[in-house]
Image (spheres, rainbow, N blue to C red):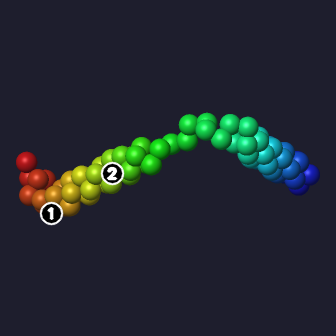
């Protein structure tokens, strides 16, 4: 039990110190190259397209599964 508490404390300390370092860095360099809105839009579109394509393939396979098993 004592070991778990010590690990939890260390993890919490690491997390809070990492967050504080990030906030300090943001204060020092406000123009540190955050991801642009365009990049986010492109990534969302790419992931959405991939999910739609995978879903379409899954629907087609489910629809023709019985017919494909005899090949």
Q: Secondary structure at mark 2?
A: helix
* Residue at 56%, 37% in the rendered image: 33
Q: Secondary structure at mark 1?
A: helix
* Residue at 30%, 49% in the rendered image: 50
Q: Is residue 7 visible?
A: no
Question: Horizontal and vertical percent for residue 37?
Answer: 45, 49
* Residue at 16%, 58% in the rendered image: 60
Looking at the image, residue 40 sits to the left or right of residue 32; the answer is: left
Q: Which mark is residue 36?
A: none
Front-most of residues 56 and 5: 56
Front-most of residues 61 and 50: 50
Question: Horizontal and vertical percent for residue 6?
Answer: 88, 48
Quadrant (top left, top right, bottom left, bottom right) of the N terminus:
bottom right
Neighbor class of circle 1 (other Cα within 10 Å; few <14, some 14-19, many 20+) is few
Q: Which mark is residue 63?
A: 1
Q: Which mark is residue 45?
A: 2
């Amino acid at each position: 039990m004592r070991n778990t508490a010590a690990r939890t404390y260390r993890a919490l300390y690491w997390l809070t110190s990492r967050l504080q370092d990030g906030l300090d860095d943001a204060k020092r360099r406000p123009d540190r190259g955050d991801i642009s809105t365009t990049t986010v839009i492109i990534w969302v579109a790419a992931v959405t397209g991939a999910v739609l394509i995978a879903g379409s393939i899954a629907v087609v396979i489910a629809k023709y599964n019985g017919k494909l098993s005899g090949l």
